[in-house]
Image (tube, helix red, strand yellow):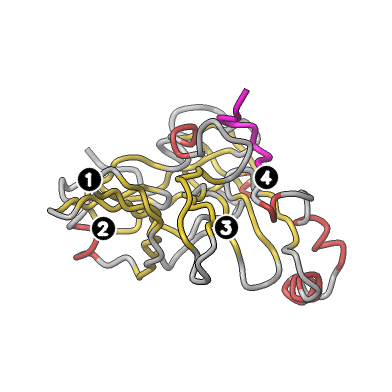
């Protein structure tokens, strides 16, 4: 059976579609009659590689590799913006599990066939978003206890939400809700304005959250009651 080459996620309804097709600035979904503007849809294409079981791998998939030292999970990124097609894929380290300790990964590498073939698809961030958003917290991270800083002071060790994304242009984003927030600091607004062509209205369209920079949840998912 021919595998679909494109999956999709509709942010407004938080609905994941296993099969999607792009038309003229629109997207249709499998055998349904629904058609949406391309700018209302996150496009999740196949990256052209398969995992260790021969399963085609898509943007947003979570891949796991396990060895004697434990297991590590990677996300196929970069996580997309509405209506934009990602063509260059990378593996973004998300978490490592070893001896029941969870720690952050910082590795990032171009997604090669050899790397992907050594891993197994265990989910997709957008299909299974409620599983991957940190649980029982008002923040975009899971607290993992205290650790010592380089200066010897205690600090909270965290596992970030994989949808929370920093940038080099003065903004942070939630790639689930497709909203952004200015980073803190004097240079943030200037960097962001330059990134959006110097147009404050365009910047305003992307600046939709006042607290996301501080990793305060806007999605309402898995909040502590």
| Residues under numbered marks 2 and 4 in contact, where contact means CB atoms less than 8 Å apart | no
**Residue 134, position as x, y percentages in the image:** 51, 38
| Residues under numbered marks 1 and 2 in contact, where contact means CB atoms less than 8 Å apart | no
Q: In terms of sequence position, does the residue under pointer 1 or pointer 3 come before the other? A: 1
Quarter of the image that includes the N terminus: top left
Can you identify the residue that label 1 sits on? 55
The mark lying in front, picked from 3 and 2, is 3
The mark lying in front, picked from 1 and 3, is 3
Q: Is residue 82 magenta?
A: no
Q: CA distance from mark 3 to mark 4?
A: 13 Å
Q: Nearer the viewer, residue 175 or 146?
A: 146
Measured along the vertical axis of the image, is residue 64 above or below residue 113? above
**Residue 164, position as x, y percentages in the image:** 57, 52
Can you identify the residue that label 4 sits on? 216
**Residue 207, position as x, y percentages in the image:** 78, 55
> Residue visible at 68% across and 72% down?
169
Viewed as shown, does residue 165 lie left or right of 111? Answer: right
Q: CA distance from mark 2 to mark 4?
A: 35 Å
Q: In terms of sequence position, does the residue under pointer 4 or pointer 1 come before the other? A: 1
Viewed as shown, does residue 29 lie left or right of 101? Answer: right
């Amino acid at each position: 059976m021919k595998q679909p080459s494109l999956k999709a996620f509709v942010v407004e309804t938080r609905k994941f579609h296993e099969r999607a097709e792009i038309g003229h600035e629109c997207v249709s979904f499998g055998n349904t009659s629904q058609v949406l503007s391309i700018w209302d849809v996150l496009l999740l294409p196949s990256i052209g590689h398969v995992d260790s079981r021969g399963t085609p791998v898509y943007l947003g998939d979570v891949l796991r590799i396990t060895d004697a030292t434990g297991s590590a999970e990677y996300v196929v990124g970069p996580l997309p913006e509405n209506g934009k097609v990602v063509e260059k894929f990378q593996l973004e380290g998300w978490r490592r599990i070893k001896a029941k300790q969870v720690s952050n990964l910082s590795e990032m590498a171009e997604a090669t066939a050899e790397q992907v073939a050594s891993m197994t698809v265990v989910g997709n961030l957008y299909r299974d978003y409620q599983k991957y958003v940190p649980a029982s917290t008002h923040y975009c991270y899971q607290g993992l206890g205290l650790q010592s800083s380089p200066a010897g002071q205690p600090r909270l060790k965290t596992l970030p939400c994989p949808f929370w994304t920093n940038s080099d242009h003065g903004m942070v984003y939630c790639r689930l809700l497709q909203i952004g927030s200015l980073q803190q600091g004097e240079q943030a607004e200037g960097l962001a304005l330059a990134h959006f062509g110097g147009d404050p209205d365009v910047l305003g369209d992307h600046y939709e959250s006042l607290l996301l920079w501080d990793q305060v949840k806007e999605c309402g998912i898995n909040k502590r009651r």
